Amino acid sequence: MSTQAWTFIFVGTTFALYLTIAWLTRVKDTQGFFVAGRGVPAPANGMAIASDWMSAASFISMAGIISVMGYAGSVYLMGWTGGYVLLALLIAPYLRKFGHYTVPDFVGDRFDSNVARLVAVVCALFISFTYVAGQMRGVGVVFSRFLEVDITVGVMIGMAIVFVYATLGGMRGITWTQVAQYWVLITAFLIPAIAISIKLTGIPLPQVGLGSTLIGDGGQAVYFLDKLNQIQVDLGFSRYTDTFVGTWDKANVFFVTLALMIGTAGLPHVIVRFYTVPSVKAARWSAFWALLFIAMLYLTAPATAAFARYYMIESLNGQAEETLPEWFENWERTGLVQWFDDGDGRVLYSAGDDNEIFRSGSLGGPELAAIRQDHQRWLDTGGVTGADARPVLRGKGLSGPDRDIIVLATPEMAELATWIIALVAAGGLAAALSTASGLLLVISSSVAHDVYFRIINPQADEKQRLLVGRSVIGLAVVVAGLFGVYPPGFVSQVVAFAFGLAAASFFPTIVLGIFSKRVGTLPATAGMVAGIGFTAFYIIASVYGGMAPWTFGLFERGISPQGIGAFGALLNFVVTFVLTPFSKPPSEAARDMVDQVREPEMVETGERVPGL
Amino acid sequence: MTAGPDLHDPAIHAALERYWRANLRIMVSLLLIWAGVSFGCGILFADWLNQFRLPFTGFPLGFWFAQQGAIVVFVLCILVYCLAMNRLDRRHHEELERLARRR
């Protein structure tokens, strides 16, 4: 059977599964809609968090990024897992004890201020929309690459599916769908990694294989990583395992990792998950399960990255037109990888000016065709007319293959069965859809609960609130879909923004709200505004305004916008601490609330927020 | 707010204070380990550690910490936290029950 037939089968089956779950988990009240009735067992919640967390970017792009960055790719590996330790120890159990519906809810109640609540709502909405746009695009890309349907049609299908299960089942539907999606995506990620590890090192555990010797390399046992380092050096790249190369100096690796960790712990769509479990204890355990399930992918990704790097270089370099591997021809059509020969008829992928492997990036079809035509003329006439495409593409920063190809084409590189390739397509879709639905719920609850119910119409009854919740989620799906069809150019850059804002706003404010009884309304709000303001200014000025990154007089290189959230969070803490002695202590009620949140004992049945 | 013990009772409040201090001790120790493996071994000392290898493997040590070791320790940190807090919660619960019986 062909890859495409298998893909239709896998994608069709998984989508049918998601819709079945949606029907079985449909809800009738706001508890069910916003916090899944608080009845999700810890391991299931852990799986839901894991698939909520691991987006199209984690699944499709991360291994590819690491593959290019080598050691420095660790910023994503450590940053996106280390945040869970902060979540588990500093946030999850206490927010569960607080027991409302959203993150702005906690900020607004603890600091007794609707201004703080609104600032938090704006942050939550901004972070969620930024993120969800990328997910919908990811759905479209997977559809177009594996099923050869138009990106727009792909996005529409994705929207329709999410629309059904998110409006029908709310958080409950989303949670159980995500549990299913976790298994689809992790299977799709692990099988190719295991297969390729066996092929290269004979060891089925990719994490062990990465540190082992290669098989069949002239009888002499050579460690895989040593061999990869050697190949990299021979081609002019830096050694794969070497630390602090190029722009990734120690300070930048440190602060980007820190910013991603703090940002992770402050992302609203992850935090709200801890409201869905029955108890404080279950909140802690679900953080453990979540990180365990996430680690399955994050410990495998470095192995996939390094193996794929090796495979790609080895299977391309020195090949002629006729001997090029099949995967290359398949993916050449998508533009993710391009070969422009220098005239010797042999492929060379290197770090130097003689590199012949490129990607088409954002170049349009006609533009690329023109470059290719010029290049062919240049080859045919021996350089008299036409133009060498290589300096042109190098000038546009398009050297080397697209990073997405690492995960998408690895099964083909390793010549795995066609059904495994199809499984990767279903996995990519599961990763994108699960993250999108979690974010849509945050958008819905921020508007329907925090703005509509808590501020605009506190008298609203269950029915009205549920209707508003469903309408907002429906509307948000459409907006997200539009972002997917017409991606704003800034999407890839604003991911740094989402993490920066989460780090600078939610994390410090929530942690201080729990761990200090002295911090009151004014210092907390001022800290939050200062943190957000500084982070937003730095990112906008350096990404769009051409501002040189700051060294703070301490570091040799400026801090990249990705790492600035760490400084934003620090500023938030500092401003809050400095203002606290001069401001009114929090009210008696707020101090009691802190005690309540710290006390682990709770009555587990029939609990309702007063006034609901 | 969820119902629970009456925290305005001085004896119960004192019990909560003791619970909280024990919690902070557990938390701070685990956070030191968390920072030690990631920011310490994985970043600040990674270049120095890279001259060694993880025994019996081809991993340079700093590289291994950054891409494998730190993540494994993160998972263990949360596991230890859950187990330690379960124990602490149980002792706290017994203390509250003793207080309730004395009345």
Image: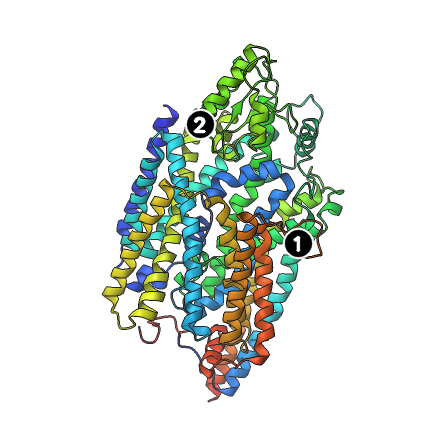
| Quadrant including the C terminus of chain A | bottom left
Dividing the picture into quadrants, the one containing residue A9 is: top left
In the image: residue A530, left or right of residue A176: right
In the image: residue A453, left or right of residue A305: left
Q: Residue furthest top?
A: A381
- Give the residue displayed 63% in from the left and 66% down from the top: B28
- Give the residue displayed 52% in from the left and 61% down from the top: A533
Give the percent coordinates (x, y) of residue B85. 54, 67
Tell me, for residue A334, which label it has, or none: 2
- Give the residue displayed 29% in from the left and 44% down from the top: A160
SS for dot 1: helix
C-alpha gap between disc 2 and disc 1: 39 Å
Tell me, for residue A550, which label it has, or none: none
Q: Residue furthest left?
A: A463
Q: Residue furthest bottom?
A: B103
Residue under numbered circle 1: B39
Q: Chain of mark 2?
A: A
In the image: residue A309, left or right of residue A108: right
Q: Which class describes the residues within 10 Å of circle 2: few (<14), some (14-19), or many (20+)?
A: few
Q: Chain of mark 1?
A: B
Give, as a three-letter code, the residue at label 2: Thr
2 vs 1, front mark: 2
**Is A195 drawn above or below residue A469 in the view shown?**
above
| Quadrant including the N terminus of chain A | top left
Give the percent coordinates (x, y) of residue A27. 27, 58
